[in-house]
Amino acid sequence: MKKIVSLLTVLLLIVSLFSPPESAHAEKIIVKWGKITLKEGHIGKVIINKDTPLYKLDTKENKLTTVRTLKKGEEFGVYSKKTDETHGLLYGLGSSQFVKDSKSITYQTPSKEKKELVGKERIWLRNPDFFANNNGETVDLKNLQEAVLISEEQDTLLTTLNIKIKIGEKYFTNSYVGKDIDEIYLTTNPFKTYKFSDTIWNLIKNEKVQTGMTEDQVLLSWGYPNDVNSYDSEYIAMEQWIYGDILDGAAIYLYFNNGTVTSWQEF
């Protein structure tokens, strides 16, 4: 018996087919800065020019106790700075541990570009529209282009999502209307999650479909269908995925047998 699948069922299909493994999680950007990894909360770093003491501060008695010696050539992230009449300028390395300002150390602050990347996530763009680059020029990006998500702003009244991304050293912006975040980008690396051949990946990146492709591969290539019709029997499971709408002037009907594409129709 043929079943017309409701919008809710389409959403359930999307979740079941396109949810990453439970162990998958968003990839945070690792910002290397010399010998340290720049972390949230860091305001700078100290470079040890000459062996110098690391102190523990007793805040009640305002007393410094030597913890160990920091060695020449080491670098440490700085979370705070404080100055008092007794100890002078102190750089806080965390856990109430400090190093004194002296010629034995050099204090540096990170560039604006490095600070901007701290805590940011990698994303993979899904069927990206044209993005505007730093110079206001539009750039056509490939499907599943890897990028760094710099910011996103949601206008709930207009159902508009404005996102800013970084690819290499260049920044790009775009606005999406009426789309959910999972229709715009992935937060897990699809190239690690799915083990497809180079031929299939090339089709997906160019937003193409061919017979024999699986449902996962089609979802990665074309995104979510507008509607799904299904027919199940003891021997075969058939599905029709509809992209677009005939009433709007164009639609493609994809047909699956037991989870793989067998044919399609264009209207």
Image (cartoon, helix red, strand yellow):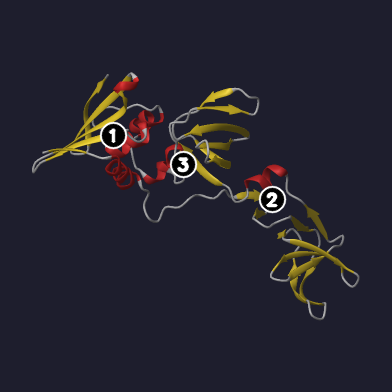
**Could you say which quadrant of the image residue 220 lies in?**
top left
Residue 140 showing in the rendered view: yes
Q: Which mark is in front, 1 or 2?
A: 1
Instruction: Find disc 3 in the rendering and name its residue.
Output: 181
Instruction: Find disc 1 in the rendering and name its residue.
Output: 227
Q: Which residue extends farthest left?
A: 234
Instruction: Find disc 2 in the rendering and name its residue.
Output: 34
Horizontal side, residue 173 vs residue 202: left or right? right
Element at badge 3? helix
Q: Position of residue 134 (x, y in %)?
A: 64, 29
Q: Residue at 28% of width from left, 38% of height from top?
A: 215
Horizontal side, residue 266 vs residue 134: left or right? left
Element at badge 2? loop
Q: Which quadrant does the C terminus fall into?
A: top left
Q: Position of residue 44 (x, y in %)?
A: 74, 54
Q: Residue at 63% of width from left, 24% of height from top?
A: 136
The residues bearing labels 3 and 2 have C-alpha atoms spaced at a distance of 35 Å
Q: Earlier in the sequence, mark 3 or mark 1?
A: 3
> Between 48 and 79, which is closer to the camera in this rendering?
79
> Between 175 and 210, which is closer to the camera in this rendering?
175
Residue type highlighted by circle 1: Asp
